[in-house]
Amino acid sequence: MESDIVHDVLGIGFGPSNLALAIAVEEHNTGLPEEDRLAARFLERQPRFGWHRGMLIDDATMQVSFLKDLVTLRNPTSDFSFLCFLREQDRLIDFLNQKTLFPLRAEFHQYFEWAAERMGRMVEYGSEVTAVDPVRDDDGRVAYFDVAARDPEDPGRTVRHRTRNISVAMGLEPHVPPGLELTDRVWHNSQLIPRVTELTASGTPVRRAVVLGAGQSAAEAVDYLHRSFPGAEVCAVFAKYGYTPADDSPFANRIFDPEAVDVYFGSPAEVKQSLIDYHRSTNYSVVDMELIEALYATSYREKVAGRERLRFLNVSRIRDVQPKAEGGLDIAVEFLPTGEHQALDADLLVLATGYRPRDLGRLLGEAAKLCLRDDGDALRVGRDHRVETTPDVTAGIYLQGGTEHTHGLTSTLLSTTAVRAEEIHQSLLKRRSSF
């Protein structure tokens, strides 16, 4: 089945990035005659809006200011702001009384859901994209893409949408280290809360849980498991000597400023790499100091009491994981300085091992062959987040994420979501007017 509408932009994925773009388009279209509006549609494979649901721990807070919401840095007067959400929920004064810039993660998810519900007419949930095919016009130029997706009403049927541009915002996929695979006993931390809920509901005993990783998610998983299973031992395994504090100091945080994207984009490759290396401590494998101190205090209290449930196996790595016939896992942990191995009899292993970009080539199929790549085989991407393509292509492929090599650390973060949405929006308008 084919849609009879030609869209100006069709979004693949409807997380915060494409939600911010949808709002920018909606606010642009308000009050304009039909011929001046941008026709936009968004496809999301999930049955409803969701953003890292598996890690919405009840007391976990955001690591970016609420002012870096979906709209404020683009349009401070927008009624899609977090503050407008709080006002509608009758919590604005209560939030202000906390004197914090960092809301609960669960509350920010509520904000996203609130905004997504208001944009519901522009999105199709349960619509998984299966192909992106180039379409040539009478002059032989690739002027459109036909995007095929499963029909939400009938998954056995395919719906095709024609569009002049696509905005790809599929997010990241969980990274599982080589040699390991996910099972009912080995989880990625992205599934932490539902898996713990299942275990608790079934009454499955947990004597020992192991968490691999040294970043914020790993530390949160350690803390959450320790609280969720009060009779269990929780072992944190990481190659560092200890958790590294996140650098959220004012000058370091300037790496997330919109202007920093301009600086990064225009820099030589070696300078880009230096900037990433210098400022990894703002985002990668780092933990909020408050959580570090809380975990250390818990560990010390247990030592004083003579019952240590919280253990830190530092300067170590997991060498082998074998399932046991009677259930559970045999985990071999190597202490790196000496090579000594320790065997852990565990009930579960949580991999807090991060995420990686999804395979864009697999999604785009034939359209991927139109994209230009640099000497390192990475996609060439313009400052407006549009992938550079062969000269015969006028249709656009915009990336929201997966552009750290061209746009810096904010590529996969919320810090410049609103600004990036506006940059793509303005690029769409400019390119439409030129044809």
Image (cartoon, rainbow, N blue to C red):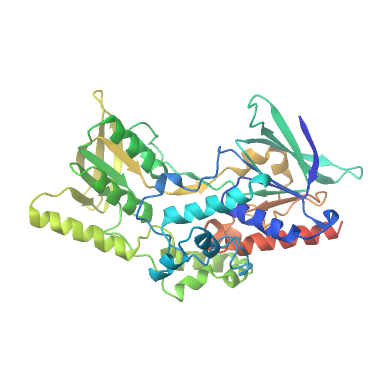
> In the rendering, at what x and y percent does residue 70 appear?
58, 60
Task: Name above or below for residue 98 compared with residue 397.
Answer: below
Which is more toward the observer, 357 or 75? 75
**Image position, residue 136 (x, y; %):** 84, 41
Closest to the observer, 336 or 415: 415
**Where does the N terminus fall, quadrant-wise?**
top right
Q: Quadrant of residue 405?
A: bottom right
Query: Is residue 159 shown left or right of residue 18?
Result: right
User: Considering depth in this image, is 125 or 117 the residue closer to the camera?
Assistant: 117
Nearest to the observer: residue 400 or residue 107: 107
User: Residue at 51% across / 68% down in the picture?
Assistant: 275
Asked if residue 206 shows in the view, the reply is: yes
Residue that lies at the very extreme toward the right in this rendered image: 138
Q: For the point 7% across and 52% down, which residue is it?
A: 306
Q: Is residue 183 left or right of residue 401?
A: left
Res 373 visible: no
Q: Which part of the image, by quadrant, shows the C terminus?
A: bottom right
Q: Is residue 219 left or right of residue 75?
A: left
Count numbered badges in the picture: 0
Q: Position of residue 191 (x, y in %)?
A: 40, 41
Residue at 71 percent of width and 59 percent of height: 425
Residue 337, how many percent across, how many down? 23, 53
State the residue lying farthest toward the bottom: 251
Picture layout, residue 240 above or below residue 152? below
Quarter of the view holding residue 426: bottom right
